[in-house]
Amino acid sequence: MKILYTIIIVLLILFVVTFSLQNTLQVRLVYYDVLDVILPVYMLILFAFLIGVIFTGFMGIIERYRLNRTINRLNRMVRDLKRDVRENEPPVVREDTRQHDQALQN
């Protein structure tokens, strides 16, 4: 599995390098009077990709936090229910058979 992961990473890096070498055309980004930047197409795509990765990672962290809270709440509920079952169980009564037999003989 580690070899497959390494191969996928190497192929991804190779793709990024060849993509950036083939797409060096300059693009001008203008946003009203706030932003006026000239950068290569691959940088624009890379920035968009990185913003997506960061956003997705952040959403994943939030989802994990919510799931952990739910798991903890459900574990508490299971623990409480087990305690209630133990408290409501009738006690096990075990008689010593020798004493019982002797009492019957007398």
Image: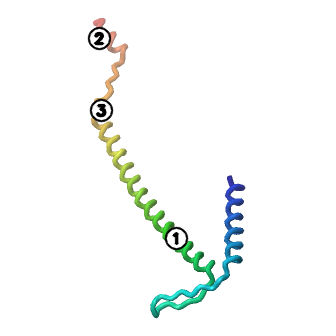
Image mark for residue 52: 1
Q: First in sequence: mark 2 or mark 1?
A: 1
Task: Check whether the beta carbons of the residues at disc 2 and disc 3 lie within 8 A of each other.
Answer: no
Instruction: Say the numbered circle drawn on residue 89.
Output: 3
Q: Quadrant of the C terminus?
A: top left
Q: Residue at x 32, y 24 (%)?
A: 93
**Mark 2 is on which residue type?**
Ala
Q: Label 1: how many residues lie within 10 Å, few (<14), some (14-19) or many (20+)?
A: few
Residue 86 locus on image (x, y percent):
32, 37
Residue drawn at x 49%, y 70% is 55
Q: Secondary structure at mark 3?
A: loop
Q: Which residue is mark 2?
A: 103
Total number of numbered discs in the rendering? 3
Label 2 – label 3 distance at C-alpha = 29 Å
Which-is-in-front pick, marks 1 and 3?
1
Q: Nearer the viewer, residue 40 or 83?
A: 40
Task: Quote the CA–CA distance across marks 2 and 1.
Answer: 82 Å
